[in-house]
Image (cartoon, grey):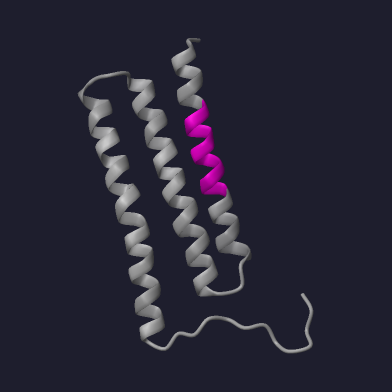
Amino acid sequence: MSVINIIAGLFVLAGFFFFFTATLGLLRLPDFYTRLHATGKGDTLAVLYSLIGLAIYHGFNITSAKILFIAVFMFLAQPTATHAISRAAFGCGFLPWKPEEGVEE
């Protein structure tokens, strides 16, 4: 096993970690906006790390250049889409969650 394969594997594992934490945020957080925040940040980093790991694994060729191009596009598009979704929800009157008075979690 070469050093390049180990580095690529570490990037893919980091991507898996961020996918896992984003999924936990989606399942555990109380409202739409916090869930959207967790999945937006987590999935962006997960896709970025996973694609960088795949590009490293393939070496320096046209395939890795295409993978890196996709990674840059996803890094720009996912936060923009998350922001647009949250603004649309707020504009439609979907208010953030507020805990009830006197109730501790």
**In this picture, residue 76 sits left or right of residue 4:** left
- Whether the magenta-drawn stretch holds residue 15 is answered as yes
At 40% from the left edge and 73% from the top edge, which residue is drawn?
Answer: 86
- Examine the image and state in which quarter residue 28 appears: bottom right
Reply yes or no: does residue 25 show up in magenta.
no
Residue at the far left in the pictured view: 62
Q: Quadrant of the C terminus?
A: bottom right
Toward the top, the furthest residue is 1
Where residue 6 sits: x, y (%)? 51, 19
Horizontal and vertical percent position of residue 40: 44, 58
- Is residue 20 found left or right of 40 in the rendered image? right
Image spot of residue 51 (x, y percent)? 37, 36
Q: Nearer the viewer, residue 29 or 80?
A: 80
Q: Is residue 26 above or below residue 44?
A: below
The magenta stretch is 10-20
Residue drawn at x 37%, y 23% as measured from the top left = 56
Q: Residue at x 55, y 62 (%)?
A: 26
Q: 105 above or below 40?
A: below
Image height check: is 86 above or below 51? below
In this rendering, the count of numbered labels is 0
Residue 90, located in which quarter of the rendered image? bottom left
Dominant secondary structure (helix, strand or loop) of the stretch shown in magenta: helix
Q: Residue at x 23, y 33 (%)?
A: 66
Query: Height in image: 45 above or below 79?
Result: above
